[in-house]
Image: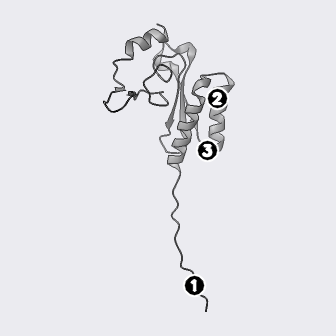
């Protein structure tokens, strides 16, 4: 089945759709939806190729989840999960190279980088700085 036909079937009703009255555009909580917007472009279910970024279980780095285009009809084998843990700057560069080198959904590159950097920023440790009183010189 084509991606457009699948989208026409699931766009109005699916388990991942969140509709609220005050929000102009409905949200979607499906896996591999980078912006959580219910639209054809960002949908992670209907495309042969989709990209997702999620936090690592041990809270060190992030995982990139993408579909293999040739195995899109085999759900168990279609998803590939790659861990990126080599520091924030290098991980983001590796992610950008992964998406742009093979021309794998280049339209989602910026959204994937933003989600990955937000995950890395949330994992950053906060350091408490103790204030010391300066001694008065006499």
Image position of 106 with respect to 60: above or below: above
* Residue 39 position within the rendered picture, expressed as x and y whole percent measured from the top left: 45, 22
Sequence-earlier tag: 2 or 3:
3
Q: What is the CA distance from the residue labelled 2 to the residue labelled 3?
A: 15 Å
Report which quarter residue 95 is drawn in: top right
* Residue 129 position within the rendered picture, expressed as x and y whole percent measured from the top left: 53, 66
Residue at 38 percent across and 15 percent down: it is 10
Image position of 83 with respect to 58: above or below: above
| Contact check, label 1 and label 3, Cβ < 8 Å | no
| Contact check, label 2 and label 3, Cβ < 8 Å | no
Sequence-earlier tag: 1 or 3:
3
Residue matched to label 1: 135
- SS of the residue under disc 2: helix
Q: Which mark is residue 98?
A: 2
Task: Give the left or right position of residue 111, taking residue 101 as reference.
Answer: left
Q: What is the CA distance from the residue labelled 1 to the residue labelled 3?
A: 39 Å
Residue matched to label 3: 88
Residue at 46 percent across and 17 percent down: it is 75
Q: Residues within 10 Å of mark 3 (few under 14, many from 20)?
A: some
Sequence-earlier tag: 1 or 2:
2
């Amino acid at each position: 089945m084509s991606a457009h036909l699948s989208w026409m079937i699931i766009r109005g009703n699916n388990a991942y759709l969140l509709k609220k009255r005050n929000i102009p555009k409905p949200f979607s909580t499906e896996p591999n939806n980078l912006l959580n917007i219910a639209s054809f472009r960002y949908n992670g279910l209907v495309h042969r190729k989709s990209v997702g970024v999620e936090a690592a279980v041990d809270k060190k780095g992030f995982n990139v989840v993408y579909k293999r285009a040739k195995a899109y009809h085999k759900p168990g084998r279609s998803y590939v999960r790659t861990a990126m843990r080599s520091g924030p700057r290098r991980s983001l560069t590796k992610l950008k190279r992964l998406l742009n080198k093979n021309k794998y959904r280049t339209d989602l590159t910026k959204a994937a980088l933003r989600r990955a950097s937000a995950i890395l920023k949330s994992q950053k440790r906060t350091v408490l700085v103790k204030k010391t009183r300066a001694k008065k010189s006499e």
